[in-house]
Amino acid sequence: MAIIYSYPLTTPKVKDLLIGTSVFDEDDENSPRNNPTVSFTIKSLLDMIGTGGSQTLQQVTNLGASTTNAITIANGLSVTGTFTDSTGGVGIAGQVLSSTNIGTAWVSDAGGTVKSVAATHAGNAFSASIGNVATVNPSVNITMNGITAQYVNGAGNLATLLDIPGLITSLTTNGTSGVSTLVGRVLNIPNYANTQNTLTTTGTGAATLVGTVLNIPTPVIPFTSLTTTGSGAATLATGVLNIPTPSTPVIPFTSLTTVGTSGASTLTTGVLNIPDYTYTEIDTLQSVTARGDTTNQKILMNGSGADGYLYVTGNAGNPVTNPTHAQGFAFAYNNSGGSRECEVFWNTGTTTAAINNGSYLGFYNEFLNSDAGNARVTDSQLKLYGSGELELVGATPTIRNNVWRMPTTAAPNTGYVLAKASGSINLEWVPNANTTETFVLTAAQMQGLSSTPVTLLPSPGANKAYKILACSTYLNFAVAFSASTSLSIYTTDGVSTSNQVAVASGAFLATSSTLYTVTGSSFSHNPIYVNSALLIDAGVITGGTGSTFSIKLTYQTLDTNNF
């Protein structure tokens, strides 16, 4: 191949060819693998550089986004990103781009500076000055001059109060006539003589003013004398006014009677008879309630015998209905429409279910205590709650009939049942015939058994005693106990003790959690003391911290009066 510069020069055309190498592109599956020599048109190269041979701003800046040349933009410039100053900063909101003489920088906008503000005021009463001159918000400050004894005149100058034109400093009353004068600051008002008109009362007719004489005629009284004779209207004749004296009414009867119960009243020969009329009430409760069936007054039933009751006999079940009252009571008969029941509806009003459940229908016993000056005593006896719970709340709340009476105290312990007491109708709390209970002893209680026995069951009451039927134990092991003794469950008469059950030491000296049953000879053949609590004690026991020892007893309560 000849040397390149040996070829003649010519102007290239887009269709001219150039020789090159097609380099293998592993990301292009159509790329040849042997890097063959190929030819390109100038147009294909220009297409890679720019459409139609011209590059776009994007293509130019893809190659390099900076220039040392000055840039002149003849039309508008739109920037959707940020402006960067000479330091590479983009500034913050509110800053402006300012020249630094050798570049640009984002700086805070300090605003303008007022260059000149002037303030003047006529006169000498005020002083004017300018404040905040180094800001864009200057102020004009007006200061008052002078003292409290001065005022500001129309020219804006200070003047003393005594210099006010027309100010009066003194008053004189010289002379008795003429006009008042003001000379300097002295006002003179003459002490004028009294020149009031003369008053006369002569003649008749209208009042007159002639010159300085005012004449008001004296009124003429049209009568000369007064009489009170005769009857009828008053009269005025020839100066005599007669006003008749009123006549006292004549009472046309001399006595009053009340004979009869009907008919018209009569007046016969001075006797006025007004019958003692019998009044028949035409209104009934039916007619009254037809006009209005509510009242804000109490209704007092104070009759006797059959009239001392409040009767509700309407048939609420014809047809079956429910009461419509918003709150309070409603009484009904046969509301079901067939059961002929008498019912009381008590309504707690518009409220929530929770509040209604806590509301109640109460029954109270009241009396006037004659031992305390007839003071009213009110004792709540029974409450029926909206939840359906019935509570007895009297002084000794209980339920009874002619064969039994509920107790008024709570059971002394769990497992108790009600049984009829001997010789009365009272029900009393007694342990169940075969009652099983579990008693848990802590390590501290076990360690104290040698000096402080533990009461398992309280005294069952007079003529009663506990008989133990079965016993089993459970050691909940944490740390081992140490002892050379067994446990004794016993009764006492206050002086002597009687062992009922002996629990072998193996039951609580085990080194793991252990169930144990007490049988056979462990149940002692000894007396059982009546009216005695059931207790447990032992010799010296140590250790066992954290362990517990449970004793489950099945027992009966024996009654020597009902054995």
Image (spheres, rainbow, N blue to C red):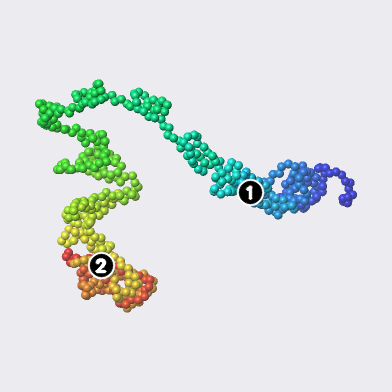
Where's residue 310, x and y in %? 20, 42
The residue located at (88%, 51%) in the rendering is: 3
Asked whether, in this view, residue 24 is left or right of residue 134, the answer is right
Q: Which residue is mark 1?
A: 130
Front-most of residues 186 and 263: 186
For marks 2 and 1 on the same chain, the one whose residue lies earlier in the sequence:
1
Point out the frontmost of discs 2 and 1: 1
Q: CA distance from mark 2 to mark 1?
A: 102 Å
Q: Secondary structure at mark 1?
A: strand
Count of marks overlaid on the render: 2
Front-most of residues 480 and 95: 95
Residue 458 image label: 2
Front-most of residues 127 and 98: 127
Circle 1: residue type: Ile
Where's residue 433, x and y in %? 23, 63
* Image: 383 above or below 323: below
Dot 2 alpha-carbon crowd within 10 angstroms: few under 14, some 14 to 19, many 20 or more = some
Check the picture and name the quadrant holding the C terminus. bottom left
* Image: 257 above or below 464: above
The residue located at (17%, 28%) in the rendering is: 249
Q: Residue furthest bottom?
A: 484
Asked whether, in this view, residue 5 is left or right of residue 468, the answer is right
Where's residue 32, x and y in %? 75, 50
Residue 45 image label: none
Where's residue 8, x and y in %? 89, 46
Q: Residue furthest top?
A: 238
The residue located at (55%, 42%) in the rendering is: 164
Front-most of residues 127 and 435: 127
Can residue 94 be spotted in the picture? no
Dot 1 alpha-carbon crowd within 10 angstroms: few under 14, some 14 to 19, many 20 or more = some
* Image: 380 above or below 250: below
